[in-house]
Amino acid sequence: MDARAILEEEARRSFRFFYEEANTDLKSSGYGLIRDKTSEIAKDVASIASVGFGLSAFVIGVERGWISYEEAYDRVKGTLHSFYHNVEHANGFFYHFVNMNTGKRNQHFHDCASIIDTSIFLNGALTAASYFGGDIEVYFQKIYQRVDWEKYYNREGNVYYMGYHEETGGFGRWDMYAEQMMQYFLGVASPTHSVPTIIYEGFERRLLTYKTYTFYNSPGGALFTHQFSHAWFDFRSYLDPDGIDWFENSIVASTASRAFSIDRKDNFKTYRKNAWGLTACEGPNGYIVPGTPPYYDEVKMQLDGTVPPCGAIGSIVFTPEAVKEAVHYYYHQHPNLFGKYGFFDAYNEDVDPTWYADIVIGIDKGISLLMIDNYLHGTTWKYYMQHPLINKAIDRLGFKKKEVRVES
């Protein structure tokens, strides 16, 4: 199987995760919720971000012929009905993890209303609203306009809070470059609770260098920080108000990530030119968030030889040839890495015997599916970018269209 065929199969099987690992009980308060991961110990845990990727997945599914328009419409409408009426929230922001059956927050871990996970959910809902219209647009607007972005705005620091507890208020600061770019578009465009556009200037841009690669990096260098917002917003066509080309920045970040794995191939058995893309994933001893330099928070370094396929795949729009070589290597050299839902979450040759994850994680399947499809067909980019809300945000933030030649 060549790389193109592997990518297409990975996309199809990733869609299957969102289709099958969802609550489809029409009588359930949690209808439409999607599992965080395929782990038995977390079988009742739904991820709000997983649902966001899933809503975009249904749009892709219709376009690719994997699901009928009518079934996808009903699934999406039912999901948004649950989120408007049943899924627990605080000031419109949903909790990171909720119970699959009830929609109530999971009180055992990550018990906070999460701005980034809510934003990922809203991105998926917006994409579906743009595609389907009708009642889905109505539900999206009700959910979106209920979100109180001002509640999450730290005026003194001119940044978003990361989370919110009703008991103690906001905590954490989005004061660095990372995956949160989507929050600025969603927050400034709100007709009910918008934040001032100056918030976009509130996060620090650190221009750092690894070898010959100079780019704006996140503190720990996990590659998903350069991918998640790009799964929806088509940065190929825009410069920000300061002239920063965030798409080009992600190209350099992805190239640097691959170079780092090549540089460490003598220290780790797993890392090599076709095994790269360090990002948040399952590891032999649990969830880890490895990244690549240039770091400015080395406390977050978790280098143990674990490589997740979604790390490279999520950069298919940035470095397509390098990603094609990687997926060909993963598929043909590590057959235990591919299963019902495509690539399992990660593997590690630096433990004996070689460790292969036996689960997939929703957000990792999501970034793989959306980016593969954007590369091949541009589906999510097309429908996300044509929604009036995003056009309003672009104008308000002062992003400028650039001349760009997009390869077919």
Image (tube, rainbow, N blue to C red):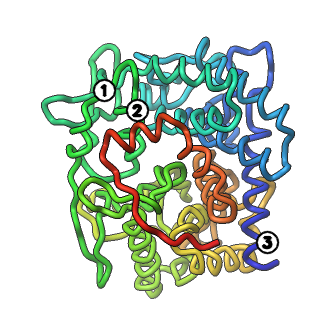
In 3D space, how far apart are the residues under numbered discs 2 and 1 (Cα atoms)? 8 Å
Residue 61 image label = none
Screen quadrant of the N terminus: bottom right
Q: Residue furthest bottom?
A: 266
Question: Mark 2 or mark 3, which has the lower sequence index?
Answer: 3
Crowd class of label 3 (few under 14; some 14 to 19; many from 20; radius 10 Å): few
Q: Which residue is mark 2?
A: 115
Q: Which residue is mark 3?
A: 5
> Marks 1 and 2: in contact by CB < 8 Å?
yes
Q: Nearer the viewer, residue 358 or 63?
A: 63
Question: Mark 2 or mark 1, which has the lower sequence index?
Answer: 2
Amino acid at pointer 2: Ile
Screen quadrant of the C terminus: bottom right
> Residue at horizontal 58%, vertical 75%?
320
Where is 186 relative to 223, above or below? above
Residue 276 left/right relative to 174: right
Amino acid at pointer 3: Ala
Q: Position of residue 195 (x, y in %)?
A: 29, 29
Q: Which residue is mark 1?
A: 152
> Residue at horizontal 32%, vertical 58%?
218
